[in-house]
């Protein structure tokens, strides 16, 4: 009957996506994925995995306020989800709401105390709030859990620099620099600290040479010959 056909169509419309459909859409562009997960969220806003996927992609397309709105309504239904708190914290950071972000990251660290990401994120927020001692405590906890985390080593180093410990900052940034996942920002930050601190190849002032400092920091012997001009 027509009524049965309509009912079947309605049930089909409300059916969650199949694993095959999800796998296919995950290869699509961000806007396509956002539309897909928005549809899945409308079908079942109580699904934790759907909420995670939806709010992640909202952040990816720059819709941080929308992500915050969705998370504000769904986090109470998932009080033990550290991932939702992390996404909330990152969205709040993107909107400049650093104090609220710190609270979200703190909640994530309480829910998942063995998760290095939560402690590292909390440290970054606390540094932004100029609570550097508390930030450093969070970074150290993250590094206890994941000692080879280049981004955390770098952030810890910069935090130490902000409190005047340039030697400690250099040590942490050198550790980060030696890791395979260190990005260009680590190199830039190490060069900055070496320029301020003097570095292992003692050089201060306008004649400072970043490359020489980085080679020296890596353990190479560095010599500048007179008459060659500045490197």
Image (spheres, helix red, strand yellow):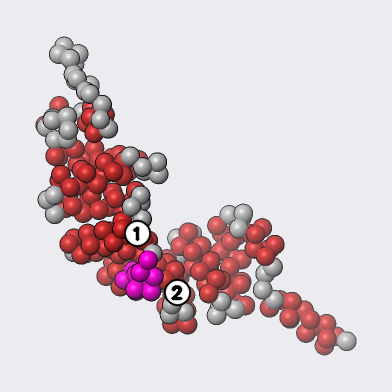
Q: Is residue 120 above or below residue 73?
A: above
- Estimate the spatial distance between the alpha carbons at disc 2 and disc 1, rounded to whole Å: 19 Å
Q: Residue at x 57, y 74 (%)?
A: 41
Secondary structure category for the residue under label 2: loop
Instruction: Find residue 207 and report its image quarter.
Output: top left
Q: Residue at x 15, y 46 (%)?
A: 166
Q: Residue at x 22, y 23 (%)?
A: 222
State the quadrant of the C terminus: top left
Image position, residue 5 (x, y; %): 83, 82
Q: Residues within 10 Å of mark 2 (few under 14, many from 20)?
A: some
Left or right, 211 with reference to 27:
left
The answer to which of 129 and 161 lies nearer the viewer is 161
Q: Of tags 2 and 1, which is closer to the observer?
A: 1
Q: Residues within 10 Å of mark 1 (few under 14, many from 20)?
A: some
Name the disc covering residue 145, or none. Answer: 1
Q: What residue is shown with label 2? A: 81
Quick check: can you spot residue 118?
Answer: yes
Q: Is residue 208 above or below residue 25?
A: above
Instruction: Find residue 209 and report its image quarter.
Output: top left
Quick check: can you spot residue 92?
Answer: no
Instruction: Find residue 65 and report its image quarter.
Output: bottom left
Q: Residue at x 16, y 11 (%)?
A: 227
State the quadrant of the N terminus: bottom right
Q: Residue furthest top?
A: 227
Q: Which range of residues does the magenta coloring cover?
A: 104-114
Residue 29 lies in the magenta stretch = no
């Amino acid at each position: 009957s027509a009524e049965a056909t309509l009912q079947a169509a309605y049930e089909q419309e409300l059916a969650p996506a199949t694993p095959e459909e999800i796998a296919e859409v995950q290869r699509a562009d961000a806007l396509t994925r956002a539309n897909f997960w928005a549809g899945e969220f409308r079908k079942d806003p109580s699904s934790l995995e759907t909420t995670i996927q939806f709010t992640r992609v909202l952040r990816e397309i720059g819709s941080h306020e929308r992500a915050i709105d969705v998370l504000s309504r769904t986090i109470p239904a998932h009080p033990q989800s550290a991932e939702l708190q992390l996404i909330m914290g990152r969205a709040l950071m993107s909107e400049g709401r650093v104090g609220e972000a710190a609270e979200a990251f703190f909640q994530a660290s309480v829910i998942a105390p063995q998760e290095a990401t939560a402690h590292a994120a909390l440290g970054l927020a606390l540094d932004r709030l100029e609570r550097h001692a508390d930030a450093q405590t969070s970074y150290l906890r993250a590094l206890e859990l994941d000692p080879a985390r280049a981004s955390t080593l770098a952030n810890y180093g910069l935090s130490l620099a902000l409190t005047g410990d340039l030697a400690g900052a250099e040590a942490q940034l050198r550790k980060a620099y030696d890791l395979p996942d260190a990005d260009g920002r680590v190199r830039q930050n190490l060069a900055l600290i070496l320029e301020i601190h003097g570095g292992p190849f003692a050089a201060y002032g306008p004649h400072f040479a970043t490359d020489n400092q980085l080679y020296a920091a890596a353990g190479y012997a560095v010599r500048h010959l007179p008459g060659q001009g500045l490197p």
